[in-house]
Image (tube, coloured by chain):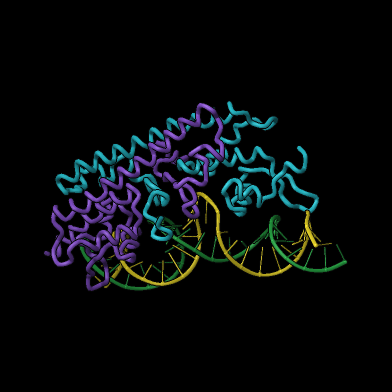
Chain colours: A purple, B cyan, C yellow, D green
Amino acid sequence: MDARDLLTIGELARRSGFSPSALRYYEREGLLRASRTSGGQRRYERSVLRRLAFIRAARTIGVGLEEVRHILDTLPEARTPTRADWSRLSRSWRGRLDEQIQALVALRDGLDSCIGCGCLSLQRCRLSNPEDQVAEHGPGARLLPPMLRRTPAQGA
Amino acid sequence: MDARDLLTIGELARRSGFSPSALRYYEREGLLRASRTSGGQRRYERSVLRRLAFIRAARTIGVGLEEVRHILDTLPEARTPTRADWSRLSRSWRGRLDEQIQALVALRDGLDSCIGCGCLSLQRCRLSNPEDQVAEHGPGARLLPPMLRRTPAQGA
DNA sequence: CTGCGACCTGAAGTCAGCTTCAAGTCAAGG
DNA sequence: CCTTGACTTGAAGCTGACTTCAGGTCGCAG
């Protein structure tokens, strides 16, 4: 609670790995809160670091910011969240991640059955059949994200 | 080669499951080619259907359009691609899909180790540590796409 | 009290992968 | 020939998650 325990946006950025602009953006979007100095600069509590850790984990497994916000809204406002609070939130992802892995495995198996024939038949092939569940879920739908794609720039 | 074997953009859209606007977009991006009637309307060869099946499969597993274009560019221009051609292209995805599944499994296992402690420690937790390989691969990186997320609209 | 780096704001830009729009043209059945 | 629906184009809009920019302010060391 001491002022020296509060972090500037720059410090928080360095410690969390998020850019200052992202932190400001998260605040606008209601994922983060900060107190202000008399001059209007942001000061963050240390607990924000754990909140950001959660956000990063969520983003990593593909949860959108809006949903992250909803999840974070279930945390108690009055007190600083406990380990048990965070544990509860994290546990809910396990099932989700399992689902996502299942979807990919199903896709791979579908691909296996296609490789033999080279068919890519619109009628028969699970990978190409637009009638399938996985397809046609709105514009720009992608099954896997930039993160797991070959990034032409900064190739490790 | 008979004119009656050629498809209009509307027919192709219905048969492939892509929207006409997407097909025009793909043409602009160099993924598709079409001949024209004297009046300037597009006419597609039947083989474009298989090409589109490939594109859909690629998109489904998260390959970006630019890379799809590169891959398609390796098809012979002179002749209509054979099954062997398509099979060769498809096979290359198997390894990629395996990698992607591995990445997700690693993530899930990391999550498991976090659930016990509720830590989400920036130092220790694989899911939240920005030093990890998977993190910090540029802005907006997402591990999983809209397609596998809860879509609030049109929930099935 | 001055200098300088860190910070502030709102607005605009970026990327992918399309969709939507407006205004006009084509193709084919009757 | 006429109508009607399918087609054409370029330009602009959309979503998500930010980044970048311009122009101005804060805060602290010296």
Q: Report whether A67 appears left or right of B48.
A: left
At horizontal 33% and vertical 37% (from top left) the residue drawn is B103
Q: Is residue A119 above or below residue B22?
A: above
Query: Image quarter for residue D10?
Result: bottom right
Residue A33 image position (x, y, % from top left)? 25, 65
Query: Compared with residue A56, is residue A98 higher up or lower down, i.e. above or below?
Result: above
Of residues B69 and A17, the one drawn nearer to the viewer in this rendering: B69
Position in image of residue B136 (x %, y %): 34, 46
Residue at (39, 32) in percent of width and height: B98
Relative to A141, B53 lies left or right: right
Q: Quadrant of the C terminus of chain B?
A: bottom left
Q: Quadrant of the N terminus of chain B?
A: top right
Q: Is residue B37 visible?
A: yes
**Which residue is pictured at 73% across the width and 41% down the height?**
B5
Asked if one can make out residue A146 in the rendered structure from this viewpoint, the answer is: no
Query: Residue at the left extreme?
Result: A2
Left or right, residue B121 beside residue D23: left
B71 and A25: which is toward the camera: B71
Q: Position of residue A136 (x, y in %)?
A: 49, 51
Residue at 20 percent of width and 48 percent of height:
B120
> Quarter of the image holding residue A117?
top right
